[in-house]
Image: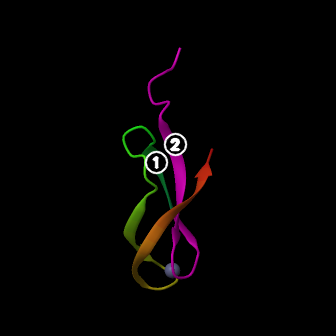
């Protein structure tokens, strides 16, 4: 039986400019089908940049 929370996957968010993975977050793959694209602060670029979902973590 599917248990509660099965649809939440952990993903990494990577800076589109310097390609560093700066954040790890979770996404519900049922409610949010598209890959995440968020404006987040990047410590390497030292400004807000686009961060894309790039990898699935355990
Ligand atoms: Zn960056």
Q: Position of residue 42 (x, y in %)?
A: 46, 77
Magenta includes 16? yes
Local crowd size for mark 2, using a 10 Å CA cut-off: few (<14), some (14–19), many (≥20): some
Q: Nearer the viewer, residue 24 or 9?
A: 9
Which residue occupies the extreme right position in the image?
Answer: 58
Check disc 2 and report its element: helix, strand or loop: strand
Q: Position of residue 24 (x, y in %)?
A: 51, 57
- Disc 1 under 8 Å from ligand 1? The reply is no
Is residue 7 shown above or below 53? Answer: above
Q: How many dots with numbers?
A: 2
The answer to which of marks 2 and 1 sits earlier in the sequence is 2
Asked if the residues shown at circle 2 and circle 1 are in contact, with their CB atoms under 8 angstroms apart, the answer is yes
Check disc 1 and report its element: helix, strand or loop: strand
Quarter the C terminus occupies: top right
Q: Residue at x 46, y 56 (%)?
A: 35
Q: Which residues are magenta?
A: 1-22
| Mark identifier at residue 9 | 2
| Mark identifier at residue 26 | 1
Q: Residue at x 48, y 79 (%)?
A: 43
Which residue occupies the extreme front position in the image?
Answer: 34
Is residue 46 shown above or below 16? Answer: below
| Mark identifier at residue 15 | none
Which residue occupies the extreme top position in the image?
Answer: 1
Q: Residue at x 48, y 66 (%)?
A: 52
Q: How is the image coloured?
A: rainbow
Local crowd size for mark 1, using a 10 Å CA cut-off: few (<14), some (14–19), many (≥20): some
Q: Position of residue 10 (x, y in %)?
A: 53, 47
Q: Residue at x 49, y 21 (%)?
A: 3
Is residue 7 shown above or below 17? Answer: above
Q: CA distance from mark 2 to mark 1?
A: 5 Å
- Taking 32 as reference, is 17 left or right? right
């Amino acid at each position: 039986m599917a248990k509660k929370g099965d649809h939440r996957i952990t993903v990494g968010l990577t800076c589109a400019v310097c390609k560093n993975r700066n954040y790890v977050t979770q996404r519900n793959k049922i409610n949010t089908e598209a890959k995440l694209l968020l404006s987040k602060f990047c410590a390497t670029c030292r400004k807000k940049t686009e961060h894309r979902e790039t990898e699935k973590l355990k």
